[in-house]
Amino acid sequence: MSVFSAAMDVIFTNPAMAVEAVWTSADEAQSRPVRLIWKRPDEELSFGQAQIVAETAVADIRVLDLASPRQGDRLAIGALLYEVIGDPRRDREGLIWTMDLTPL
């Protein structure tokens, strides 16, 4: 186990850092609990002369917990339901998936 992998285990098991969620595949054939780091940063967008601040949702999930997520998969975080938009991206070490989400 690498130092990075060990660090990710500590972070993703820490209740102050990660939350429980339920992942469901796009075709609803598979579903399982996962832990994720949930981020909801504001993003500044330009529209002509106007600056718009849009709320976004992003989830980081360990590759160990979810081998091959894809666009259209869903994540239930508490009472909130999100869909994965775009292709999930892996970090440089290949340990974490980062997924952009949209509310359903």
Image (cartoon, rainbow, N blue to C red):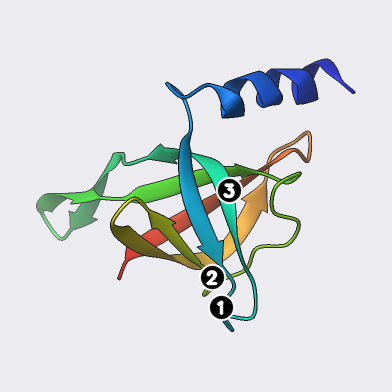
Residue pointed to by mark 1: 26
10 sits to left or right of 40:
right
Instruction: Tell me, yes or no, whether the two marked residues, 2 and 1, touch with CB atoms within 8 Å.
Output: yes
Amino acid bearing label 2: Asp
Q: Residue furthest left?
A: 50
Residue 47's place in the image compared with 3, above or below, is: below
Q: Distance between the residues labelled 2 and 3?
A: 13 Å
Q: How far apart are marks 2 and 1 (CA)?
A: 4 Å
Q: Is mark 1 on a helix, strand or loop?
A: loop
Residue 103's place in the image compared with 3, above or below, is: below
Q: What element carries label 2?
A: loop
Residue pointed to by mark 2: 73
Q: Mark 2 or mark 3, which has the lower sequence index?
A: 3
Return the x and y of residue 63 as percentages of the image width and height: 73, 46
Amino acid bearing label 3: Val
The N terminus: image quadrant: top right
Q: Residue 34 carries which label?
A: 3
83 sits to left or right of 12:
left
Q: Nearer the viewer, mark 2 or mark 3?
A: 3
